[in-house]
Amino acid sequence: MFDDERAGFERHLRWMRDWGEFISLDRAVELLSSAEPFGGRYFCVTFDDGIANCLHNALPILQRHACSAAIFVVTDCTGLSLERDAAALSAFFSHANYPGATPLLDWTQCRQLTDAGVTIGSHTANHVRLTDLDAAAARAELQRSKQAIETHLGVPCDHFACPWGGPGRDFDPQRHPDMAKQLGYRSFLTTVRGLNRHGDSPLAMRRDHLLANWPRHQLRYFLRGA
C-alpha cells in the first residue's frame, strides 16, 4: 500500500466494518471447513507480494480498526535490497507488473508483522506461474517458500496465494491445490472474484482485488453479493 492510498484504504475498512465482521484467514478456513453452516457477513483482508509499505502504511490502519490480515511474500525476494540486489529484483518487478521498484519486506519486518498478529503466507519462492513449471519445479516453489517462512519466523505457514491466481492460466486446478495440501497448506487462494460460502473448499478460495482509492460505489459493486 502506497502513501497516497492510506486514506482510501481506511475508508474501505470503515465501510466493511459497518457492513460485516473482520476475521483472520485461519478463521475463514475454519468456517469453510466446518460441518455446521455459519451465518453472518465476514471480510478477510489479504495483500500479495510482500511490499514493505504493508508494514509502514497498512498495519497502523489495520490496528485502528481491529482488522486481521494476511500478507503473502515471495520468499527469495524477501530481504533483498533495491540498491544491492537490483538485478535479482528486476525480474520480480517485471513479473508482478509493478510500475517501478519499491522496497520489499525483510525478515525482521515480517517478524514485526507476525508479532502484531498478521499472518504471513507463501506467494511462491520466485513469483512464478505454476503452469510454466513441471511438477517437480512447482512442488519445489511451494515447499521451499513454506520452509523459508517457517524457518525465519518460527510459525507455521498454512496459507498459499497463487501468483496471478487464474485457474487454467496460472495454475492447474486439478493439480496444484492438491499439491499444496500434500505439502501442508490449509488454503490455496486464487484471484477468482466472488464470495466464499459454507461448503466451498479452502483450496479454491475466491478473492476480490480492490484498489485502495476506489470510491465507495465501486466497492459496493464488487462486494454487492456480501
Image (tube, helix red, strand yellow):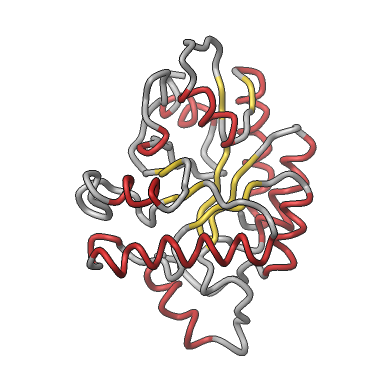
Q: Between residues 193 and 155, which one lies in front from this camera angle?
A: 155
Asked where in the image residue 19 lies, by quadrant, the reply is top right
82 above or below 56? below
The spot of residue 195 in percent (x, y) is 41, 25
Q: Between residues 14 and 78, which one lies in front from this camera angle?
A: 78
Total tally of numbered discs in the picture? 0
Q: Is residue 34 left or right of residue 167?
A: right
Q: Is residue 125 left or right of residue 168?
A: right
Asked where in the image residue 41 lies, by quadrant, the reply is top right
Q: Is residue 148 left or right of residue 140?
A: right
Name the residue located 62 percent from the left edge and 29 percent from the top edge: 23
Look at the image and tell me in which quarter the N terminus lies.
bottom right
Q: Between residues 220 and 189, which one lies in front from this camera angle?
A: 189
The spot of residue 70 in percent (x, y) is 60, 45
The spot of residue 68 in percent (x, y) is 67, 37
22 above or below 58? above
9 above or below 32? below
Name the residue located 61 percent from the left edge and 52 percent from the top edge: 120
The spot of residue 147 in percent (x, y) is 54, 64
Name the residue located 46 percent from the left edge and 25 percent from the top edge: 33
Name the residue located 62 percent from the left edge and 57 percent from the top edge: 2
Q: Is residue 63 left or right of residue 170?
A: right
